[in-house]
Image (cartoon, rainbow, N blue to C red):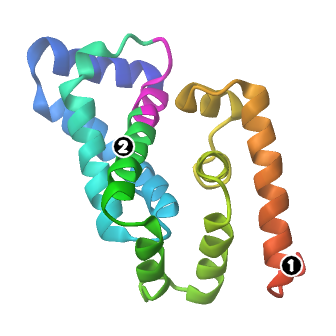
Amino acid sequence: MSQLNDISLVAQVVVFRNTRAFDRLVGKYQSSVRRFFLHLTCGDSELSDDLAQDTFIKAYTNLSSFKNLSSFSTWLYRIAYNVFYDYLRTRKETDSLETLRVDAQYSTQQNDIGRHMDIYRALNMLKETEQTCITLFYMEDQSIEKIADITGYPTGTVKSHLSRAKEKMATYLKQNGYDGKQ
């Protein structure tokens, strides 16, 4: 039912230029897209907001290219994924992502800052592809098949990235005082 509602809203935007219909799509997905970026940026809320805004602008301008071959949310996450990697490419040219992660380390907006920062540090140790797969699977509750659609990786590759990422994160967290009983 939700997918049918999304398709109806997309059709209203494309055919009738109904911006209120797009507002409803934004309202429905903005929290999850922003949360996706929060995890990928290690808690930088301002950057997450900027990237989410870029995602919705690109989604709006390209809405007529949505062909309903996947769910609207998968299509939107694919745009978000591309926006993040475009950001990383431009960021690498001007400054390292490490500066962003150090800044996020001192953010006090999290309730349990110590635990969150340890998780962000563990995520930081992962390759970008592993980090994306872990974030989508565990933090955004996406299926392996949806992650494959979003990233363009085969499902076996997604499973491999998840397995390696879990192992690396577990090792890091154990070395830093987490014994798995917390």
In the displayed structure, 14 sits above or below 113; it is: above
Nearer-the-camera pick, 76 or 121: 121
Image location of residue 132, percent across then percent down: 59, 48
Determine the residue located farthest toward the front in the rendered image. Answer: 93
Q: Residues within 10 Å of mark 1 (few under 14, many from 20)?
A: few
Q: Residue at x 41, y 81 (%)?
A: 103
Image location of residue 50, percent across then percent down: 26, 57
Q: Which residue is mark 2?
A: 86
When asked about the image quadrant of residue 178, the answer is: bottom right
Residue 164 covered by magenta stretch: no
In the displayed structure, 134 sits above or below 62; it is: below
- Dividing the image into 4 quarters, which one contains the C terminus? bottom right
Q: Residue at x 24, y 49 (%)?
A: 53
Q: The disc labelled 1 sits on which kind of residue?
A: Lys
Q: Which mark is residue 66?
A: none
Q: Which residues are magenta?
A: 69-78
Q: Residue at x 18, y 16 (%)?
A: 14
| Helix, strand or loop at mark 2 | helix
Q: Which residue is mark 1?
A: 174
Does residue 16 appear left or right of residue 66 in this picture?
left
Image location of residue 81, percent across then percent down: 45, 40
Does residue 61 appear left or right of residue 136 in this picture?
left
